[in-house]
Amino acid sequence: MSYESLNSRAAIACALAATLSGSAGAQRGAAPTNDLPNAYNSVEGAFKLPDGRMWGSTSAVEIGKDGKSIWVVERCGVNSCVADATTGKMSPLDPILHYDADGRLIRSFGAGLLVGPHGIFVDRDGNVWVTDYQDNAPRPARGAAGGAAGGAGAAGGQAQGRRGAGGPLPGATVGHQVYKFSPDGKILMTLGKPGGGVEPEFFFQPNDVLVTRKGEIYVSQGHGQGKSEILKFSKDGKLIKRWGQTGTGPGEFDQPHALAMDSKGRLFIGDRNNNRIQIFDQDGRFLEEWRQFSRPSGIYIDKHDTIYVADSESESVSRNHDGWKRGIRIGSAKDGSVKYFIPDPNEKATGTSAAEGVAADEKGNIYGAEVGPRRLMKYVKK
């Protein structure tokens, strides 16, 4: 083991010990936080699509630079933007949608570029970053023999639930990349190898992306296959470092599904299948672990350090988090307190349900992007 690795492990151990001994004032325990007031009314159907188009699955919602417009990415009316899984042919629909505060569509773009759009971020200049966690490798028709056992792919991401090494599949020409778009849809930067790549290349199943005020870029990857880790890039797209591996310890991940940053510059990582948020500094040093916000599919932190965490899987897809209810928990990123809870109205769900992606505008309205119900919900204060 290298000197650097020994130092890294020692630092993680010290940080964990400090967390366990100094957690006063924050609800960091494992008791479910279900019995909290719901201070919000639900608004369904607030966002209209062009005539003849239906909502597909969406896990990605973000607020525009203006603080009030809404960006959302949906999967072309279904759960993948591949129109024909046997050939890898892409859908002609635009998956990236920009709405004004009243729910009117301003613009759309991105047709043919994204297979399974998953995470979204708007940087300080208003540019839009999107991750694509699937690929368009041709696959046998449903029910046919000889299906490939490799990468996460099209046709609804049928490989997503299988755990294992994973990796790119032959014939993939689109997918497993991160795009930077201008607000009008021009591609400004592309990170990753088309169709996917594994270490030392990247990406395979990139989940989310975050850009700091200085322009440094963080990407989380690993959605049930491949290595779960975090990659950090310079503002011009050069890889600075990568850290983490699949596991349950501090600094390890099992589906690092969401990224957010507070006013102190701490990086919050939604470690979904470990049912926790892990908090790091910007160099990847472990600081703290929070479990009080349930199973984090999505995280959003506003300028006041209010934190919004979406749980779309407890007691449905997930069977390792019984006793916790799905929904959106709202609290403080400063002290870890949980103050409000918007529950999933479908208490009997067996699949993903309620918001997976979450964001909040300058007025405190909350937006939930839903994969299973295939809709974008709005929540306003009572």
Image (cartoon, rainbow, N blue to C red):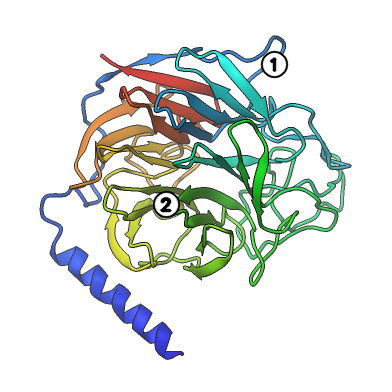
Q: Amino acid at mark 2?
A: Thr
Image: 147 above or below 154: below
Q: Secondary structure at mark 1?
A: loop
Q: How many numbered circles does the render carry? A: 2
For the point 67% across and 61% down, the residue is: 166
Rendering coords of residue 339 (x, y %):
20, 33
From the image, state whether disc 1 or disc 2 is nearer to you. 2
Q: Secondary structure at mark 2?
A: loop
Image: 150 above or below 349: below
Between disc 1 and disc 2, whose residue precedes?
1
Rendering coords of residue 371 (x, y %):
56, 32
**Cα separation between marks 1 and 2:** 35 Å
For the point 50% across and 32% down, the residue is: 61
The answer, for residue 354, to whether it is visible in the render is no
Residue 5 or 101: which is nearer the viewer? 101
Image: 170 above or below 33: below
Q: Residues within 10 Å of mark 1 (few under 14, many from 20)?
A: few
Rendering coords of residue 171 (x, y %):
85, 54
For the point 82% across and 51% down, the residue is: 147
Q: Amino acid at mark 1?
A: Arg
Tell me, for residue 94, which label it has, or none. Answer: none
Marks 1/2 in contact by CB < 8 Å: the verdict is no
The residue to which callout 1 is attached is 53
| Residue situated furthest left in the rendering | 24
Image: 116 above or below 96: below
Q: Quadrant of residue 57?
A: top right
Q: Residues within 10 Å of mark 2 (few under 14, many from 20)?
A: some
Judged left or right of residue 210, residue 58 is right
The residue to which callout 2 is attached is 212
